[in-house]
């Protein structure tokens, strides 16, 4: 069985990130820091065939 790490991805940027990115679901832009919740933002399609 495969285990997927769903820890939030956080990056500190050299300049402030545009706060309008926070309008997207599961992305938080706070000054120079941006955080993405991968379990909510990304998805994986698994075929049953």
Image: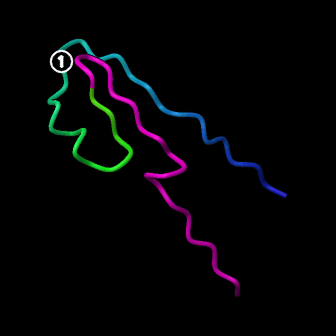
Residue 38 is situated, as x and y percent measured from the top left of the image, at: 50, 45
The residue sitting at 44% across, 26% down in the picture is 10
- In the rendered image, residue 12 lying in the magenta stretch gets the answer no
The residue lying furthest to the right in this view is 1
- Magenta-drawn segment: 30-49
The residue sitting at 70% across, 87% down in the picture is 49
The residue sitting at 54% across, 49% down in the picture is 39
Q: Residues within 10 Å of mark 1 (few under 14, many from 20)?
A: few
Instruction: Kindly identify which residue carries mark 1.
Output: 16
Residue 12 is situated, as x and y percent measured from the top left of the image, at: 35, 16
- State whether residue 35 is above or below residue 47: above
Q: In front: 6, or 14? A: 6
Is 20 placed left or right of 33 in the picture? left
Is 21 placed left or right of 10 in the picture? left
**Colour scheme in the image?**
rainbow
Q: Secondary structure at mark 1?
A: loop
Is 16 placed left or right of 11 in the picture? left
- State whether residue 35 is above or below residue 37: above
Residue 13 is situated, as x and y percent measured from the top left of the image, at: 28, 17
Residue 31 is situated, as x and y percent measured from the top left of the image, at: 22, 18
Is 46 placed left or right of 30 in the picture? right
The residue sitting at 49% across, 52% down in the picture is 40
- State whether residue 26 is above or below residue 29: below
Report the number of numbered marks. 1
Image quadrant containing the N terminus: bottom right
The residue lying furthest to the top in this view is 14
Q: In front: 43, or 23? A: 23
């Amino acid at each position: 069985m495969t285990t997927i790490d769903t820890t939030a991805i956080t990056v500190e940027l050299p300049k402030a990130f545009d706060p309008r990115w926070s309008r997207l679901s599961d992305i938080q832009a706070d000054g120079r820091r941006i955080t993405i919740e991968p379990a909510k933002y990304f998805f994986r399609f698994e075929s049953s065939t």
